[in-house]
Image (tube, rainbow, N blue to C red):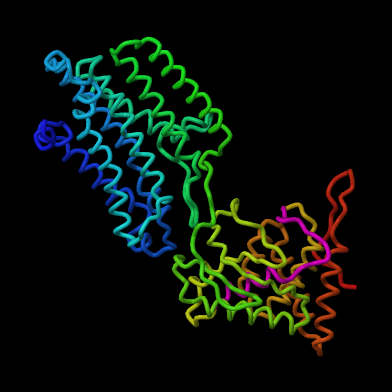
Amino acid sequence: MKFRALLRSSSALWTAPVWGGIVAFYFFYALHFEDSYEEVIGGPLWAAGQVAGSLTYFYAFAYAITLGLAAWEGGRLQQDRVWDLAPSRPRWRVAGQAVAPTVGAGWAILLLPVGMRLVETRLLPTPSALLPLIMGMGIVCAYAVVGFVLGHLAPRVIAAPFGAVAAFYVISKTSTYSDPIWPRHVSGQLSTSIAFGEHYSAPTVLLPFLVAAAVAAAVAAWWNRGPRRLPLRLLATAVALTTLVLSARTASGWGVVDGPVSAGHAPARCVGTAPQVCMAEAGGAIERLDDVRSAVVESLERLEAAGVDVAVPSTVTDGLLYERSRTRPRSTASTWWLPLTAQAEAAGPDGRIAGIRYAVLLSSVTFPCSFPATITSDAPTAWIINRDAAVLWAAYEVDAQTPYLRWRADEYAQFANGPEVLAKVKERAAKGRALPTAAQRTAWFEQEQAKACRQMPKRPAGGPAASGPQGEDS
């Protein structure tokens, strides 16, 4: 049968308004429900993230509609007794020709939203960015096989709608699973999000495809009527079960929305030396790279001039390049990871990038001891006052006191005497700034650092140490 005649007779064509309408509705409504068009194109734009996000609503639809249409086509061939009319033609060839338009419909449900989102954002995807689309297209072929065989086992008026509804429900339901967790990672509806600079790792997209392909192969083997069909059926069933078990064991070790990803693929542009400052090219603020480096260098110079012992890094790199904190390398003395793009986009009306100075401050001011990463409501406050007074003094030197005080006030809010602690910190910082000479102010800063470390309590076995909000004054 010629392709044009095959297409005209296929259920994929006369159901096109249904699945085409689904694509249009979910793309123009659901995908823009949370994020407006302006927010979508505002950045930061990353092709892999846009591809993954645009497919979120369409995996289940593509698989379900493919299965339903394939079941209808399989039932039609069974009803028309095609196998009796052309017994010499290979069954797989006849079946493949019949479901080709069905596979095309399933592919279109995935391709259309991806294509429209890439046109919308004017992004050119890399092969790695298209991995979830390629996985989905492969799984569509597997569902076409399963649906075609299903159409031979039950009347098509029953098999097609019920098969499609069941597939949609099962696939959609897996996204809510947390115990067991493996169904959400092997169902073919990827729940792992893609951050800026990331791609899906091979296991994330391979496991769902291998499970679907193994099940489809087993179904096709049981439908096969050729010689030695029993050994082939048993082998295909064993392979499918083994694949499912191994995939489930592998995916059980993943997080709820944290399948394996590969990070750090976004291109960066760098400028200057000692320090060299690098920002993401596609982050949306690359045009301010020179301004960002000027803010970094100026902040370091002002801290050094104030007497702060700063270890100038060789490289200051944009944290957006590793947007997800769990994949980002830790800052070292030679390489700092700072939110350069985020702070450049948040520049004030005067164009000054206060957030960059603030980030440099927090990376530059160190202490001869280590402090807890977070403070709790029962924490003693004496060391907090000395530590924060020292940092606030340095913040004034780089004109970053406003964001620093805002951050500390939020943390002090958990203390019953939070306003009193904040007032004491401001008072002590003002005392240091009021000293008459630069040498005296620097000496006060170093003494305050030492006091903060001395005030760090050593908790006895009986419980937490207590301290008032006064700090050490001597």
Question: Total of numbered circles in the picture?
Answer: 0
Relative placement, left or right, of 281 versus 20 is right
Which one is nearer the viewer's eye here, 130 or 92? 92
Q: Is residue 354 magenta?
A: yes
Expressed as whole percent of the image width and height from the top left, the position of residue 211 reads 43, 28
Is residue 377 placed above or below 140 in the rendered structure?
Answer: below
Q: Is residue 407 magenta?
A: no
Which residue is at a point 72% across and 80% down the rendered structure image?
Answer: 303
Quadrant, the N terminus: top left
Image quarter for residue 156?
top left
Is residue 355 placed above or below 257 in the rendered structure?
Answer: below
Relative placement, left or right, of 401 versus 89 is right
Is residue 421 placed above or below 186 in the rendered structure?
Answer: below
Is residue 107 placed above or below 472 in the rendered structure?
Answer: above
Expressed as whole percent of the image width and height from the top left, the position of residue 29 reads 28, 50
Relative placement, left or right, of 265 versus 38 is right
Which residue is at a point 86% across and 69% down the rendered structure image?
Answer: 450
Expressed as whole percent of the image width and height from the top left, the position of residue 298 reads 64, 82
Which residue is at a point 84% across and 85% down the rendered structure image?
Answer: 440
Q: Which residues are magenta?
A: 353-376
Relative placement, left or right, of 18 versus 473 is left
Expressed as whole percent of the image width and height from the top left, the position of residue 194 reads 47, 50
Quadrant, the C terminus: bottom right
* Residue projecting furthest to the bottom: 436
